[in-house]
Amino acid sequence: MNVVPGQEVYSTTYYIAVDCQNQIYQVRFERFLDADGQTLEDYNYGEDGRGGVPNSGSPEEASLKFVCSK
């Protein structure tokens, strides 16, 4: 489980950009939420977010497949 200093993170939401031609993704924005769905911390990575080829069965792979099927 992710940790925000002094608080437990219950869930995380992401905004990712995908490149359908090269089948890669990049995390652009990340939000950590507490058990009540309240924002604990936001991270805006812009063009510097982590990414690459998604792992098989990962949420990133599912997002890439969904977006690229449209």
Image: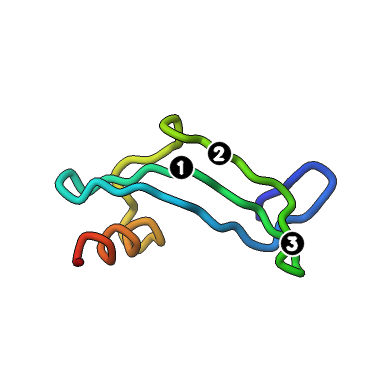
Using the numbered discs, state the Cα–Cα distance from disc 2 to disc 3 in whole angstroms.
17 Å
Kindly indicate whether the residue at mark 3 contacts the one at mark 1 (C-beta within 8 angstroms): no
- Report the Cα–Cα distance between label 1 and label 2: 6 Å
Badge 1 or badge 3: first in the primary sequence: 1
Q: Quadrant of residue 58?
A: bottom left
Q: Which residue is mark 3?
A: 38
* Rendering quarter of residue 34: bottom right
In the picture, the disc for residue 14 is none
The residue at 29%/58% (across/down) is 64
The answer to whether marks 1 and 2 mark residues whose Cβ atoms lie closer than 8 Å is yes
- What residue is drawn where x is 27% and y is 62%? 67
The spot of residue 25 in percent (x, y) is 33, 46
Q: Which residue has dot 1 on it?
A: 28
Q: Looking at the rendering, in which quadrant would you find the C terminus?
A: bottom left
Residue 65, position as x, y percentages in the image: 25, 63
Amino acid marked by disc 2: Asn
- x, y percent for residue 45: 51, 35
Q: CA distance from mark 1 to mark 3?
A: 20 Å
**At 75% from the left edge and 67% from the top edge, which residue is drawn?**
35
The tag earlier along the polypeptide, 1 or 2, is 1
Q: Residue furthest top?
A: 48
Identified at 37% across, 56% down, the residue is 60
Q: Which amino acid lies under the numbered mark 3 shown in the image of this protein?
A: Gln
Please state which of residues 28 and 3 is positioned toward the viewer in this rendering.
28
**Can you say whether 29 is above or below 64 in the image?**
above
